[in-house]
Image (spheres, rainbow, N blue to C red):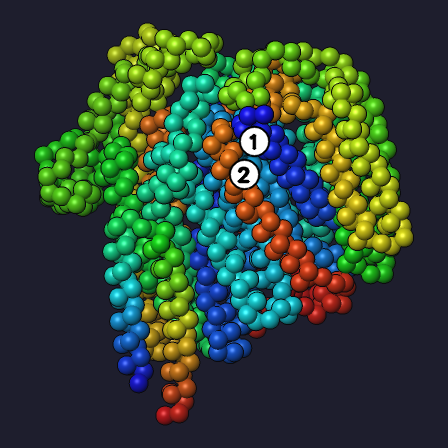
């Protein structure tokens, strides 16, 4: 379950990352900043939520 | 009136508004800082007083930063000439002002009485000195400052540091300090209780009266001062170039605008009426009313100086024809127009969220409440 | 007494010292605000108290840092006027605008809401407080945006033209000013460099807590959030740094010369100087370790574009000086008589090279009588201090990749939820805290030292930007800054370390001791 979720997160991240770099080459940097910042904040938040899940499933085992 | 000339006048008015914002908001915080050791006798009382403006001092200080930025954007030559000419004074102002953020943030972080007392003195100096310097700077503008330009508009200041602290400038400095103490007292009464409130009421009344006395003395003095008059050149819609006009210096010329347009007397009258009424309101305990009347008093004071000097902004005492005026020291039309757009959009937004911030933090601040609050200064 | 060389040198030192000092506090603010917002987002969405504790504890450290950022930022606003007044009146019409908008749009937002963020925890709903925190983050980053738009204009002036009637640059296109490529890339690069700084700061302290088995729950979560936030940010910093290098390389060839220590124009593809010991005097590298054929594709994205070396840049500069002289002479005539149409026509013809003639004027005050010797001296000035720029650039790049590697490893360890057992990682984490700071400062050295001898590239030389101060005033102010700033940093570090050691359990302001 956790592995699946992590995989999902990584795929989303990779797609956005590639998008950001492509946009960066195109020169739409302000837009890339908005997108990138939102992404980083959300990923950090998702990472914390994931940790909570990991801890809980660890405790159950 | 052509668009460019109109924009210059609008920006002159906006500068007045920003100066008033700075005087009211920063003046209030600095008045509180300057008299912190008087308002609060015990550490608990002092923390209570500091926390009355704790959530707001940083936002208020932006009025000062924005004032500087607006002068840079709309009146670049004045920014360049004033800041470089008054070098040592500007540094004293800066150094006293940069102690303030640390004073607020660091003072209550450690329990040591020596530590706290040191920061209290720091806050006192960083409230007192800047207010005196602001006033003295305005005073020196009325007197004229010794500077001139070379052919490529490089400015040269030829006066000394000490000459900026002349009796008239000091009088203006004390006047500005008095109004700041008044405004700070009104705020402390708004948010304080008991002994703190009583002390604030006493100080507020004294400083209100002081401000009026100094305002009167300054007015009588200005009537005799040599004022500046443009005698040729200086087209209101011309390019911003201060080298091609002639200016005469005549005693009493700072009253010419008032004799030409008697309606302008209402501006100094505003100061008298509001500060008098405000002082009375303070004694009655209506501190909220007194706070707004103090703000009106500031508007009257700054407006009086502006009305007397128009169109002059920074007269040169050593080469009057190179004085900087509304017509020849501004930015280009494009910049003034763009900046007006940004101002019209953002100032209402700023006023909205600033009001919201004061509303959220409304209510009395007492030593007990500060002790119990994790986040207090 | 007005001694230009001394005043110029002291003014540059003062600006450099105060700007680099200011930037010790800015990056953490830029990144920490978003990290706080992320923590609080988790608190609001999950309702778990620990995230509120996290936001409050890191907020406390943020506050200690923030106060000094605000204080030292004031200095920067003053200094354009006090020490660089010629610059201020020359570009005030253009440069003043972003500074004022910074106040209107960013500082008010950041400063008004930061008070509510600290004081408003119990005064409003969770959602509202979260919004307040986001406003602080947005405000602090928007202020970076506007000041970097100003800096972008200095690096690559677009959207303004010199007007002889007012003797200054005047704004012609606001959108060109804002969407300047240099400004765009530099903003994103700087802003997310701040994210990395904050991430490494939080991860370092959390690592230290975990190493000592303190505040485990808080530290584990903070570490996870920080490294995830940081690893993406460091990818972004490197990608944008590359874009920025590309822009600067095409628009500021002299900066590229200094960054890569390229004294001579060579047949493409040119070798990349991995390590070099440049000698400015001899105009060559005393020693260089080179990777053949790498530089040309790296900076031009092609294999056959010629990259001008110092020799070529100097030659072109001399040509432009010669062509610019009539513009300055005509300008002097115009200053006395703005209606002289002959002088105006002459000025327009040579206008584009005026800046280079101004560069020459330092050595030849009477431009009409400039000697070949003066030309050579002025041309030498066109190349920035190569050793400083070359090495700062390398420090920044190495630091950037080291951080990416560290954050990548840390992310993997954290995602496995094994980070608390990786003692080696926890041990090195605090030692990484200074690295992003080093990279940020080095980056500014590259940007600003690399732009010399100009304040506005190609238009206004640094020597003509400085105020007409006396040496005495300059010594006074520089001494004052050094004294005050030294006290400040000691106080700040003391408080920061004290509050880090104390940790999150006890963050109540203590009552007065008796």
Q: Residue at x 62, y 54 (%)?
A: B352
Residue at the (69%, 46%) spot, across then down: B25
Query: What's the mark number on residue B137?
Result: none
The residue sitting at 89% across, 50% down in the picture is B283
Q: Residue at x 32, y 43 (%)?
A: C181
- In this rendering, the answer to whether C215 lies above or below C498 is below
**In-image side of B216 versus A46 (left or right):** right
Where residue B371 sits, quadrant-wise, is: bottom right
Chain ID, mark 2: B
Q: Which of C483 and C244 is in front in this view?
A: C244
Task: Give the vertical position of C162 relative to C508 (above or below).
Answer: above
The image position of residue B84, as x and y in percent, is 56, 27
Name the residue that disc number 2 marks: B340
User: Which quadrant of the view contains residue C121?
Assistant: bottom right
Does residue B160 appear to the left or right of C304 in the view shown? right
Residue B79 location (% of width, % of height): 56, 30
Secondary structure category for the residue under label 1: helix
Q: Where is residue C503 drawn, in percent x and y?
A: 54, 69
Q: Residues within 10 Å of mark 1 (few under 14, many from 20)?
A: many
Which residue sits furthest bottom?
Answer: A61
**Relative to B163, is C52 above or below?**
below
Quarter of image, res A9: bottom left
Q: Residue under label 1, please give it.
A: B7
Q: CB of mark 2 within 8 Å of CB of mark 1?
A: yes
Nearer to us in this view, B63 or C63 = B63
First along the sequence among labels 2 and 1? 1
Q: Can residue B197 be seen at all in this image of the molecule?
A: yes
Q: What element carries label 2?
A: helix
């Amino acid at each position: 379950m956790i592995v699946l979720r992590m995989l999902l997160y990584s795929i989303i991240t990779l797609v956005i990352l590639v998008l950001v770099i492509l946009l960066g080459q195109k020169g739409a940097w302000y837009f890339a900043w908005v997108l990138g910042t939102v992404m980083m904040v959300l990923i950090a938040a998702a990472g914390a939520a994931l940790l909570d899940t990991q801890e809980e499933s660890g405790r159950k085992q | 009136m052509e668009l460019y000339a109109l924009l210059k006048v609008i920006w002159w008015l906006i500068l007045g508004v920003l100066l008033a914002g700075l005087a009211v908001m920063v003046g209030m915080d600095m008045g509180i800082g300057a008299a912190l050791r008087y308002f609060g006798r015990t550490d608990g009382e002092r923390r209570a007083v500091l926390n009355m403006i704790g959530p707001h001092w940083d936002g208020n200080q932006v009025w000062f930063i924005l004032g500087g930025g607006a002068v840079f954007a709309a009146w670049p030559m004045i920014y360049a000439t004033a800041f470089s000419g008054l070098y040592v004074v500007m540094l004293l102002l800066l150094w006293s002002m940069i102690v303030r953020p640390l004073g607020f943030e660091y003072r209550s972080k450690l329990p040591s009485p020596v530590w706290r007392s040191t920061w209290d003195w720091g806050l006192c100096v960083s409230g007192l000195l800047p207010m005196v310097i602001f006033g003295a700077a305005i005073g020196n503008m009325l007197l004229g400052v010794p500077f001139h330009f070379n052919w490529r508009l490089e400015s040269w200041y030829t006066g000394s540091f000490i000459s900026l602290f002349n009796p008239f400038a000091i009088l203006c400095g004390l006047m500005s300090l008095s109004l700041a103490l008044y405004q700070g007292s009104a705020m402390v009464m708004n948010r304080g209780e008991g002994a703190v409130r009583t002390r604030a009421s006493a100080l507020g009344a004294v400083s209100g009266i002081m401000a009026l006395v100094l305002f009167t003395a300054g007015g009588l003095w200005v009537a005799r001062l040599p004022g500046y008059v443009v005698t040729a050149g200086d087209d209101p819609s011309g390019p911003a170039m201060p080298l091609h006009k002639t200016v005469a210096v005549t005693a009493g010329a700072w009253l010419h605008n008032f004799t030409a347009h008697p309606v302008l007397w209402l501006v100094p009258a505003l100061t008298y009426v509001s500060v008098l009424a405000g002082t009375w309101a303070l004694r009655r305990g209506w501190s909220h009313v007194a706070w707004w009347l103090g703000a009106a008093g500031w508007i009257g004071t700054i407006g009086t100086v502006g009305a007397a000097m128009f169109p002059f902004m920074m007269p040169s005492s050593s080469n009057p024809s190179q004085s900087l005026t509304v017509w020849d020291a501004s930015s280009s039309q494009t910049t003034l127009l763009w900046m007006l757009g940004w101002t019209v959009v953002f100032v209402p937004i700023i006023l909205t969220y600033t009001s919201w911030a004061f509303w959220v933090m409304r209510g009395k601040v007492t030593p007990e409440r500060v002790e119990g609050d994790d986040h207090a200064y | 007494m007005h001694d230009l060389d001394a005043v110029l040198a002291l003014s540059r030192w003062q600006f450099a010292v105060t700007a680099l000092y200011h930037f010790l506090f800015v990056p953490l603010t830029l990144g920490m605000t978003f990290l706080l917002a992320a923590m609080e987002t988790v608190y609001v969405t999950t309702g778990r108290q620990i995230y509120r504790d996290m936001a409050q504890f890191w907020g406390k450290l943020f506050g200690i840092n923030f106060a000094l950022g605000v204080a030292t930022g004031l200095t920067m606003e003053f200094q354009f006027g006090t020490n660089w007044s010629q610059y201020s009146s020359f570009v005030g019409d253009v440069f003043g605008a972003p500074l004022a908008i910074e106040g209107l749009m960013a500082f008010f937002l950041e400063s008004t809401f930061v008070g509510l963020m600290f004081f408003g925890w119990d005064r409003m709903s969770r959602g509202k407080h979260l919004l307040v925190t986001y406003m602080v983050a947005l405000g602090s980053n928007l202020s970076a945006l506007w000041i970097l738009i100003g800096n972008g204009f200095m690096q690559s002036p677009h959207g303004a033209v010199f007007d002889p009637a007012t003797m200054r640059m005047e704004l012609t296109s606001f959108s060109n000013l804002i969407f300047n490529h240099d400004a765009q890339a530099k903003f994103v690069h700087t802003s997310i460099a701040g994210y990395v700084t904050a991430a490494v700061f939080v991860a370092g302290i959390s690592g230290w807590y975990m190493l000592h088995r303190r505040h485990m729950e808080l530290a584990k979560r903070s570490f996870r959030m920080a490294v995830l936030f940081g690893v993406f940010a460091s990818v972004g910093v490197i990608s944008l740094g590359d874009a920025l290098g590309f822009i600067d390389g095409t628009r500021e060839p002299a900066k590229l010369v200094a960054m890569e220590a390229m004294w001579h124009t060579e047949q493409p593809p040119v070798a990349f100087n991995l390590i070099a010991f440049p000698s400015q005097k001899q105009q060559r590298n005393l020693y260089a370790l080179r990777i053949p054929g790498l530089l040309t594709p790296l900076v031009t994205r092609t294999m056959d574009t010629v990259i001008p070396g110092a020799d070529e840049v100097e030659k072109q500069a001399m040509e432009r000086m010669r062509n610019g002289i009539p513009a300055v002479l005509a300008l002097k005539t115009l200053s006395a008589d703005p209606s002289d149409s002959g002088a105006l026509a002459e000025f327009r013809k040579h206008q584009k090279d005026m800046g280079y003639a101004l560069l020459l004027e330092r050595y030849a005050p009477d431009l009409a009588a400039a000697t070949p010797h003066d030309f050579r001296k002025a041309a030498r000035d066109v190349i920035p201090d190569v050793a400083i720029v070359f090495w700062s650039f390398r420090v920044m790049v190495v630091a950037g990749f080291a951080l990416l590697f560290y954050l990548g490893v840390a992310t993997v360890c954290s995602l496995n939820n094994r980070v608390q057992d990786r003692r080696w990682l926890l041990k090195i984490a605090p030692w990484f805290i200074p690295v992003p700071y080093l990279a940020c400062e080095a980056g500014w050295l590259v940007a600003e030292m690399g732009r010399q001898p100009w304040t506005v590239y190609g238009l206004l030389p640094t020597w003509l930007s400085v105020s007409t101060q006396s040496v005495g005033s300059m010594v006074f102010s520089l001494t004052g800054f050094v004294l005050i700033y030294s006290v400040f940093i000691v106080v700040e570090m003391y408080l920061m370390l004290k509050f880090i050691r104390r940790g999150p359990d006890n963050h109540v302001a203590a009552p007065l001791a008796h």
